[in-house]
Image (spheres, rainbow, N blue to C red):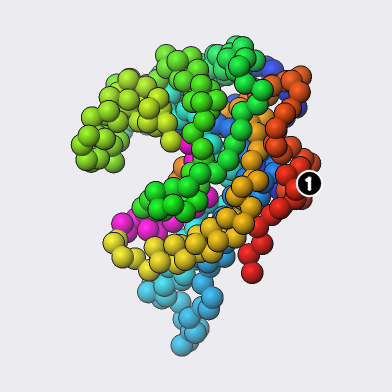
Amino acid sequence: RSCGRTAAAATPTLALVMTLLSALLPSCRAVHLDVHVPLPQGCLAYHALLANRLLREASRPLTTPRSQNNETDEKGSDEEELLQPSEHVDLFLHHTPHVTLYLADFDLEEDAQLEDEGDDGANSTADIFVERALNVTKVGAFVSTIASLNFTEILEDWENCPLAFAQGRSSSYFDIIGAYVMLPVQDTVCLQILSDALLHSLQPYLRHPISVPSWVESLPEPRRSPAVFRTKMYGSPNVREGFDPHVTVGFDYLLDRTESEGSPTLEWRDETMRQWDDAYRKVSGTCVDRVQGIALGKTGEGGTVLADSRMGYWELFDGKEEKGDLSGGDGPNAATWNGQYAVVD
């Protein structure tokens, strides 16, 4: 099954990007665009989708409550809502498996406008601020800035830019942090170079004043102070020495709302990912892909990138000979890394 849109063969023209903006990005109060590495079709994408599929299947209710009567009351509606799958991430239809290089709140909207709902001016208290739509010129300049980067020169010392999962905080190949399930990615010098280059080029587009998220403020020292500094300086705590590449494969919106310790949700998510981890370990030594390009897209809830929001794609290593045990392939079932895919019983 497809995991988002297929990468474009070449960078879309600025005119095409500007034409698509209104359809891709509706009016909004805050713009969060994610410059990221889409996982290429191959080993990592296959196992990211596998983890997401297992989480989605585990979050589905096995049975539905038997109705005592045919009447639907308010309580029944609430119970039905709680029985819906709580896993928000869908890497098969709605979201793109990716590694974020730079994500921040960029100032790309039109200036705020004040409108009066009253026809005769008598209803002055009805003045409201209209939601600001994205400014096509600003976003066009943002896209052009990325397109102007010479990635061949930036990565001149690299034959390729490898991608591989890494062991997380508990020696497993996954981390569960609050409502999020993430697959850590090896923090290579190549990924760091790409993140730094994008950061320096796109920093002028940051919205000011920059707000520090509450979760950053609540970090314990000595982690808190550097994270706050990076946020105020670069608009994100997850850059420079705080760069922490990963692939988000799960986000439980019910757990995110309740924030309850010892929730049963945590138990099944941990059990599910340990099942995935046992299967992935069998192929972890050969599961290596390479960065093929950089994309720009709109963020969704839970650390996702919306699959239908791609605004640009820039290929790396164009024309270079590929070396090393790296996968390309025509899809998840066409691999150059011995075809070893984890199978979950």
Q: Is residue 135 visible?
A: no
Total labels drawn: 1
Task: Tell me what residue is drawn at x 65 percent, y 57 percent.
Answer: 342
Task: Residue 2: give x, y in percent of width and height.
Answer: 70, 47
Q: Does the magenta portion include 255?
A: yes
Judging depth in this view, the residue of 203 and 329 nearest the camera is: 329
Above or below, comparing residue 148 to residue 124 in the picture? above
Which residue is at the far bottom? Answer: 68
Kindly identify the amino acid type of the residue bearing the numbered disc 1. Answer: Ala
Magenta range is: 245-259
In the displayed structure image, the side of residue 319 where residue 129 appears, left or right: left
Q: Does the magenta portion include 54?
A: no
Q: Is residue 57 visible?
A: yes
Which residue is at the far left? Answer: 221
Task: Tell me what residue is drawn at x 48 percent, y 84 percent.
Answer: 67
Judging depth in this view, the residue of 16 and 160 nearest the camera is: 160
Task: Residue 66: give x, y in percent of width and height.
Answer: 49, 84
Task: Residue 268: give x, y in percent of width and height.
Answer: 45, 67
Above or below, comparing residue 266 to residue 304 in the picture? below
Above or below, comparing residue 84 to residue 141 in the picture? below
Task: Tell me what residue is drawn at x 65 percent, y 46 percent.
Answer: 286
For the C terminus, give its image quadrant.
bottom right
Where disc 1 sits, the SS reads loop
Judging depth in this view, the residue of 16 and 148 nearest the camera is: 148
The residue identified by callout 1 is 334
Mark 1 is surrounded, within 10 Å at the Cα level, by few (under 14), some (14 to 19) or many (20 or more) other residues, namely some
Task: Tell me what residue is drawn at x 63 percent, y 64 percent.
Answer: 344
Judging depth in this view, the residue of 339 and 225 nearest the camera is: 339
In the displayed structure image, the side of residue 44 where residue 327 appears, left or right: right
